[in-house]
């Protein structure tokens, strides 16, 4: 997924972030379909966004891996992210959607 496509998603979802930084996920995972960025929203909350461009169905196993990566990113940056969201381009398992809600993630399709 290109940066231009990600910016289009942010614009379409009306997400405004300042101090955007792209997270190098090579240290955490080998998946090429996952992109992450961090920033500060208009109200001053630290925000962590994941973009998943895989065609396969989004299962709870993969969400658990993403949640683990989010914890590692928080440890590495020393920031407690108040807002976390995942954008995906495939179908999602209902169990995964419930897990996201329980863990404080917002989610939406791209």
Image (cartoon, grey):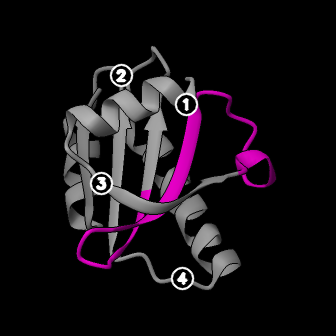
Q: Which mark sits nearer the N-terminus, 3 or 4?
A: 3
Q: Residues within 10 Å of mark 3 (few under 14, many from 20)?
A: few
Asked if residue 40 lies in the magenta stretch, the reply is yes
Q: Which residue is mark 2?
A: 89
Q: Which residues are magenta?
A: 24-48
Name, please, the residue furthest toward the right: 27
Mark 4 and mark 1 lie on one chain; the one further toward the N terminus is: 1
Give the alpha-carbon distance from disc 4 to disc 1, as whole Å: 23 Å
Inter-mark Cα distance, 3 to 2: 21 Å
Residue 79, numbered circle: 4
Which of pointers 3 and 4 indicates the residue nearer the eye? 3
In the image, residue 11 lies at what x, y percent? 27, 36
Residue 96 placement (x, y as % from top left):
29, 44
- Determine the residue positioned at 30% across, 67% down: 103
Q: Quadrant of residue 104?
A: bottom left
Q: Residue 102 appears at what percent x and percent y? A: 22, 65
> Around disc 4, counting alpha carbons within 10 Å, would you say few (fewer than 14), some (14 to 19), or many (20 or more)?
few
Q: Is residue 26 left or right of residue 63?
A: right
Q: Which residue is mark 1?
A: 3
Q: Could you tell me how far apart the alpha carbons at marks 3 and 4 are, in whole angstroms?
A: 19 Å
Q: Residue at x 28, y 55 (%)?
A: 100
Whether residue 45 sits left or right of residue 97 in the image: it is: right
Residue located at (42% from left, 75% from top) = 81
| Residue 60, magenta (yes or no) | no
Reading the image, the residue beneath label 3 is 16
* 14 is higher (above) or lower (below) than 58: below
């Amino acid at each position: 997924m290109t940066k231009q496509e990600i910016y289009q998603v942010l614009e379409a979802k009306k997400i405004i972030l300042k101090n955007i930084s792209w997270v190098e996920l090579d240290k955490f995972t080998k998946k090429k379909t996952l992109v992450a960025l961090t920033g500060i929203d208009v109200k001053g909350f630290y925000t962590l966004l994941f973009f998943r461009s895989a065609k396969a169905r989004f299962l709870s196993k993969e969400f658990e891996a993403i949640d683990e990566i989010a914890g590692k990113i928080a440890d590495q940056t020393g920031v407690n992210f108040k807002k976390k969201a995942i954008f995906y381009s495939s179908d999602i398992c209902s169990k995964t959607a419930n897990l996201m809600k329980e863990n404080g993630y917002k989610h939406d399709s791209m």
